Amino acid sequence: MNLIIVESPAKAKTIKNFLGKDYEVIASKGHIRDLPKSRFGITVDEENHLVPAYSVAKENMPTVKQIKDLAKKSDTIYIATDEDREGEAIGWHIAHAIKKDPEELPRIVFHEITKTAINNALQNARKIDMNMVNAQQARRLLDRVVGYKLSPLLSSKIQKGLSAGRVQSSALKIVVDREREIKAFVPQEYWTIDTLFKKDIEANLISHNEEKLSKLSITNKERADAIVKSVKNDSFVISKIETKERKSSTPPPFMTSTLQQVASSKLGFTPKKTMMVAQALYEGVKTPDGTSGVITYMRTDSLNLASEAVSAVRDVIKSRFGEKYLPKTPKVYTKKAKGAQEAHEAIRPTMLEFTPEAAQSFLKPDEIKLYRLIYERFMACQMNDAVFEQQSIIFSGKENEYRASGRKLIFDGFYALLGTEDKDKLLPALKEGDAAQLQSIKPEQHFTEPPARYSEAALIKKLESEGIGRPSTYAPTIATLSNRTYVTIEKKQIIPTEMAFTVTDILEKNFADIVDVSFTADMEEELDKVAEGENDWQKLLSDFYFPFIEKVKEGKDKIVSLKVAKPLGRACPKCGEELLLRSGRFGEFIACSGFPKCKYTEQVESEKEDKEKKESESSNEICDKCGKEMVVKSGRNGPFLACSGYPECKNTKSISVEEKVSETPCPECGGKLSLKNSRRGPFWGCENYPDCKFISKFEPTTIKCKEDGCDGALAKRVYRGKEVYECIKCKKRTPAEEIE
């Protein structure tokens, strides 16, 4: 028997379907050996090398035992984890966990999970690439050093629960810098001279009295009025008509970043959701021929395409659209962004006969949407360009000159498949030298707009262009910023919170390298060199580690604490110690200075009033029992209507809760949570149901459970008359004062 070890159960199931009884396929379910969760897990040896203390987590022990048992019965053990640095390292860790020499186990790789690809991989096994493993180890240790040493410092100087990260903090600075630009922006007045020539020809004023005009040239009403007067008194002729052919180039095939961007703008998918759906399409879905992977590997920054796939899609284009839509030679795309790496293919369908139309009855709604994007983008990238006829007309007067532009689609090319939102803007047939008459003219005041906030798609594009992070890190980075409440995402805009400014400001002053875009991008290039065998990973680590640790030590003494601990001159009603005004994760509160022996807390008065006000909002409804006003109250099951005449009248009434949306994303998939009604009462449910089946009676927070082996979100609730935080996974309850 032969054993193949992959990462995910879905992938294992798909591969098993392709192979006979001679093969057993098992999943490691991701990393089975890693740095410990509860401690730093890195030591420094005599040679100043950083030594990781890898261990198998308790929850992974059964998987390791299962793999060991199968390995003992197997003639050959194949490592078949994903073909990237992370996958290479996972394979190396698996070998160590089952007490095998990683150098001796055959390593197989494939870009797609199809029968042909798996058989080819088995015939072309290689050894584990230690350069790739060491690049991943270096990244893992760098991230652990920054996270474990910097996060506690921020928590001690600002407030509990804060985190910093090598890529995360650099990405946050990009968002904060954009918000600073917006806040510092001063609108600038400018005017346009909106003009129509007969018949209905829109034209732009390009010069006045031989001065070339730009968008912001006309800065006040007086000048605008003067130009309008000049234009009205001027006489115009058509001095030049120019016609040119322009091509609209085919888009390249998808890689991770562009797939996330297009899925965000066209489908409204979060980057996390895009990757979740793409993973399912890659690992295996139902098809007419059984379960199979229908797209190539989804974590890639390559635009390469297999020649067999290109040849096949050219045949499809020719038969479906005709010869004129097919270029004479296949199109080749190259990666221009900084730091391109990994010898993958671009993301493409693996079976062209499995068209989106054929897939409709096999795939889930979100899967078919994303699959259609990938399928049509791959086909479009090998079609001919679209061709436009572009026309330009110059209207010349004695003092003023205008330009009118139009265009007409003369060959639709790849638009025949993807469609286009660009409409023809046709100009009438005119002749040079003919007189032109003014139809209307109107000055219009405008003000410049501040730069737009980043959307998730725009931030991914920025991170990629700057060389920050890699395909596997874009979605988790944005999710972390949101989960840590450094940013909120409203109407597709990423908005930094006040805490984001505070943290970024401290990091800029004391750890400039961590938030510096160039430094972070340069580090990615150094990691690339490790993967290519051009850099020593231990030297890279020590060059960063020792100066960084010195800065952390300096920061402990130098950074002024922003925590509020103001004496109030009042004694604690429980123990008599002085009460202090403190700041916590959810704002200011009053606590006993005897903490942790005395855990007495109380709300600040203004917060009490706000809470009471929220708990008794007017509903504009009348009690149908006594005629008094009904008010909105908050109970353990969410909001409800109660009579304001309580306790004389105890009438209550449920209210529609469908409109209530949580600020906290779904802890399972990152989607939106909304409060819904059921016969058992209100509950919080994910928008991505049925793909994501997360439900909770209580609204989750962004705080994570700290129980060993549990990463569930905590939900605040009332239990036996006291406020507690309850984990939605392990159900452990912690008193609110201990968390806050």
Image (cartoon, rainbow, N blue to C red):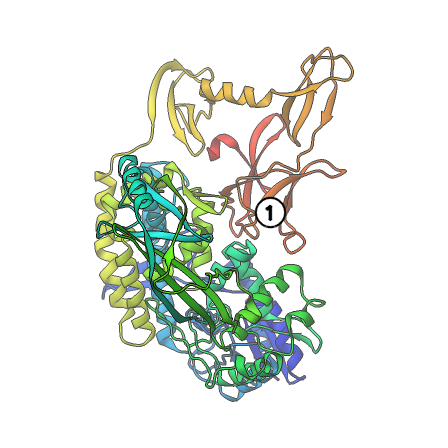
Residue 140 appears in the picture as rendered: no
Residue 377 in the figure: left or right of residue 694: left
- Indicate the quadrant where residue 315 lies: bottom right
Whether residue 491 is situated above or below residue 735 in the rendered picture? below
Task: Check the image and report above or below for 703 versus 332.
Answer: above
Seen from this angle, which residue lies furthest right?
625
Q: Is residue 571 visible?
A: yes
Q: Residue at x 55, y 20 (%)?
A: 613
Kind of residue at disc 1: Lys
Q: Residues within 10 Å of mark 1 (few under 14, many from 20)?
A: few
Name the residue: 41% across, 66% down: 390
The answer to which of 433 and 733 lies nearer the viewer is 433
Q: Which residue was labeled with disc 1?
A: 729
Residue 702: x, y in percent?
50, 42
Above or below, 431 against 713 in this view is below
Task: Identify the residue at image location x=51%, y=79%.
Answer: 110
Q: Give the total number of marks visible in the rendering.
A: 1
Q: Nearer the viewer, residue 511 or 99?
A: 511
Where is residue 59 drawn, in percent x and y? 55, 58
Q: Position of residue 478 (x, y in %)?
A: 44, 52
Residue 495 in the image, given as x and y percentages of width and height: 42, 42
Which of the two residues, 229 or 354, is positioned nearer the viewer here? Answer: 229
Q: Secondary structure at mark 1?
A: loop
Apparent side of residue 384 relative to residue 43 in the rendered image (left or right): right
Instruction: Give the quadrant of residue 21.
Output: bottom right
Quarter of the image with the N terminus is: bottom right
Most foreground residue, 67 or 157? 157
The residue most toward the top is 648
Left or right relative to 660: residue 97? left
Eyeballing the image, is 400 above or below 334? Answer: above
